[in-house]
Image (cartoon, grey):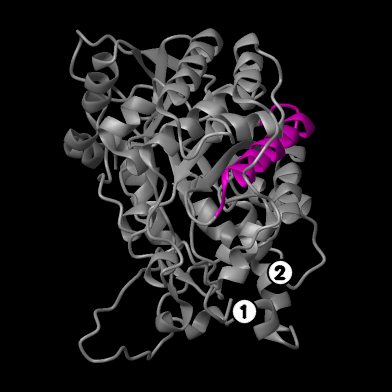
Amino acid sequence: MDRPVTDDDLAFAHAPETDQPFENALEKARAGERLSVEDAVALLTTGSDVEGIDRRRKERVLETADRRRAEVVGEEVTFVANLNNNVTTACNVGCLFCNFKDAAHTFEEGYEADPGVEAAGFTKTPAESREIVSDAVARGIYEVTSVSGLHPGFALDAEHLEILRAHEEPKAVNFVPPERYAVDPGTYVEQLEAMAVDGVHVHSMTPEEAYHARRGTDWSYEEVYSRLQDAGLDTVPGTAAEILVDEVRDVICPGKIDTQGWLEAMEAAADVGLGLTATIMYGHVENERHRAMHLARVRDLQERVDGAITEFVPLSFIHQNTPLYEHDVVSGGASQAEDELLIAVSRLFLDNVEHVQSSWVKYGDAGGLKMLNCGADDYMGTILSEEITTRAGGEHGEFRSFAEYVEMITSIGRIPVERSTDYEQRRVIDPDDPPFGPRLGPKADGTPLLESGARATADD
């Protein structure tokens, strides 16, 4: 969007009102009936007949969701030993909710920043990515998550790079030859091959990145994801979803793929045998009806992909340092009550998605633990590096140790469980048997992640 967001942009066709009474919607939820969008709106608003969120009604929704969580997954709280290896911050899409990206032209060879302006951002070569992941695997992690900016020099593979080089209008396909940049990121395939070391699980290539990896061609998403799978991709993070309603996307991320494109990419990834996760990024310009519509689209997608979505990840918008906040489009993010209701209604509405995640990066320790009593059952991962939320103004840290997980989870009377990315492997952790470290990884032996330098050196 090349102009400021105006009130007309926010005059949405979809409003957060419903004729469904709150009590009716809550009774359906308690009875385990499949909820409609109208039901979800009633629960998320605690009823259109009241102004704001009614505290007592909210607590009844949370109680119902927590009971459902116990019925579906029991008392276990899972987490994973993982690393975030985001390859580059270079991007020129211009999403207004993001402060992770840096203007791609600032990465070009010879670019001179204004005096006094500190250089920002990074791009990693495939060799650097391999070194980072290899070190983390030696420490015990077994999942690497990689989500990056849409670098104009990035191509799917060597064939795609040649197609982009020959394109008559490179600007139209967001392409700049990689040799123009101070650091060449390689291709997506080269990066995945670099990260796919020692049996680590590679969780990468969002629908938006898959779109970038097929630009300028007539390749299908199935073709793209097949090549990525051959390079070592295991599962696809369902980020870039934001809100799956185009009137919202037109405001916050007009340069991104639309709702249908996101859904098509996710279906294609599942069709070639890749596992999926799904997300929602809420608390900006959208309303409760948009959130309910988003949940419905995820639930419908799960039906079409035959259960390939292993978890749903609500992401509360971190507003500080983002263009939406700096341009006075929003004055803040979601309230704690909204966070709690979003988690709860996700549990109640998504009756075909088993796991709902609580993000300590977004909610903090106290808030994250609270969400585990609102319907969530997964508590993210160790995240040895986390740049996206931090660069947007998040204040809740970049690493969580196994010992911290055990302490926090047991403090609320739940059972700490180490899990694999796909939830197929689980290890219940005895809180009376320290030290605590990962054991499911290819080189994991229970050593705490940040105390394994000697082992990493020996294994190299």
Q: Quadrant of residue 154?
A: bottom right
Q: Residues within 10 Å of mark 2 (few under 14, many from 20)?
A: some
Task: Look at the image and give the residue range highlighted in magenta.
Answer: 286-308
Q: Name which residue type carries label 2.
A: Arg
Q: Quadrant of residue 402?
A: top left
Q: In the image, is residue 287 part of the stretch drawn in magenta?
A: yes
For the C terminus, the quadrant is top left
Q: Residue at x 35, y 30 (%)?
A: 443
Residue 373 spot, x, y in % from top left: 39, 20
Position of 133 with respect to 214 (left or right) is left
Q: Nearer the viewer, residue 40 or 444?
A: 40
For the N terminus, the quadrant is bottom right
Q: Quadrant of residue 127?
A: bottom left
Q: Nearer the viewer, residue 72 or 52?
A: 52
Q: Residue at x 60, y 50 (%)?
A: 243
Residue 153 spot, x, y in % from top left: 55, 75
Q: Secondary structure at mark 2?
A: loop
Which residue is identified by label 2? 215
Main structural element of the magenta stretch: helix, strand or loop? helix
Residue 175 numbered tag: 1
